[in-house]
């Protein structure tokens, strides 16, 4: 039990370390790659929601520490995204195919950025921050949709070949 908790915390720290220190140094759109969102989609699809919730809270708190936005904004955004993904996974995407996995990634990106935009706009109206979305936000979201789909397709192929998590189970007679 404790090994899993420590493992998930180390995975979150590694993903955020790569995202904040390595990817942030590039001058292209790759700096906008959201590895924590990709990990959230993978974990909602593969493991129990309580473990995904632990990733959401740990990642959101670490992102809030490194952010100049009001504290809790990223945690709340990831929490709304995770709960919505779990509801979509339980009600609509039950077959766990590549198409449903990629569409879950599209849904996660849309929910994440809609929630993020709403919370940033609300905090701007209240006067908590002077940060407002720029005109390049549409281009950033478009890249995010594409990169999330490509990374999720790659991870789906890896998970499909290494485990039976996404394989169809037939009842033998």
Image (cartoon, rainbow, N blue to C red):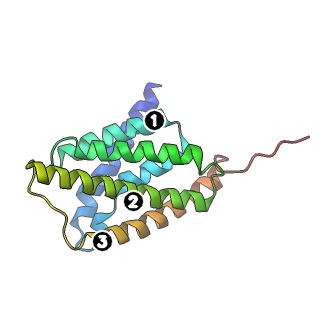
Eye-nearest disc, 3 or 1: 3
Instruction: Using the image as rendered, state which of residue 172 and residue 79 is in the foreground.
Output: 79
Instruction: Provide residue 161's location: percent of width, then percent of height.
Output: 64, 56
Find residue 138 and name its label.
3
Q: Is disc 2 surrounded by few (<14), some (14 to 19) or many (20+) residues within 10 Å?
A: some
Residue 64 as seen in the image, left or right of residue 9 = left
User: Is residue 68 something one can see in this rendering?
Assistant: no
Instruction: Provide residue 2's location: percent of width, then percent of height.
Output: 43, 25
Per the image, the residue denoted by label 2 is 110
Residue at position x 54%, y 63% in the image: 153
Quarter holding the C terminus is top right
Q: Is disc 3 surrounded by few (<14), some (14 to 19) or many (20+) residues within 10 Å?
A: few
Eye-nearest disc, 2 or 1: 2
Instruction: Using the image as rendered, state which of residue 132 and residue 102 is in the foreground.
Output: 132
Mark 2 → mark 3, Cα distance in angstroms: 11 Å
Mark 2 → mark 1, Cα distance in angstroms: 22 Å
Find residue 51 and name its label.
1
Q: Secondary structure at mark 3?
A: helix
Instruction: From this view, report whether residue 43 is shown above or below residue 5.
Output: below
Residue 46 as seen in the image, left or right of residue 122 = right
Q: Secondary structure at mark 2?
A: helix
């Amino acid at each position: 039990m404790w090994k899993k908790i420590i493992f998930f915390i180390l995975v979150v720290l590694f993903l955020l370390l790569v995202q904040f220190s390595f990817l942030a140094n590039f001058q292209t759109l790759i700096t906008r790659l959201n590895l924590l969102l990709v990990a959230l989609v993978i974990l909602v699809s593969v493991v129990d929601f309580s473990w995904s919730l632990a990733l959401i809270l740990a990642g959101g708190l670490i992102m809030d520490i490194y952010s100049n936005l009001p504290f809790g904004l990223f945690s709340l955004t990831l929490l709304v995204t995770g709960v919505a993904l779990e509801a979509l996974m339980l009600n609509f995407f039950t077959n766990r195919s590549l198409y449903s996995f990629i569409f879950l990634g599209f849904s996660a990106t849309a929910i994440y950025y809609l929630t993020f935009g709403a919370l940033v706009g609300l905090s701007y109206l209240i006067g908590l921050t002077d940060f407002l979305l720029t005109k390049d936000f549409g281009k950033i979201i478009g890249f995010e949709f594409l990169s999330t789909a490509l990374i999720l397709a790659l991870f789906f192929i890896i998970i499909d070949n290494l485990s039976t998590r996404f394989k169809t189970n037939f009842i033998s007679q």
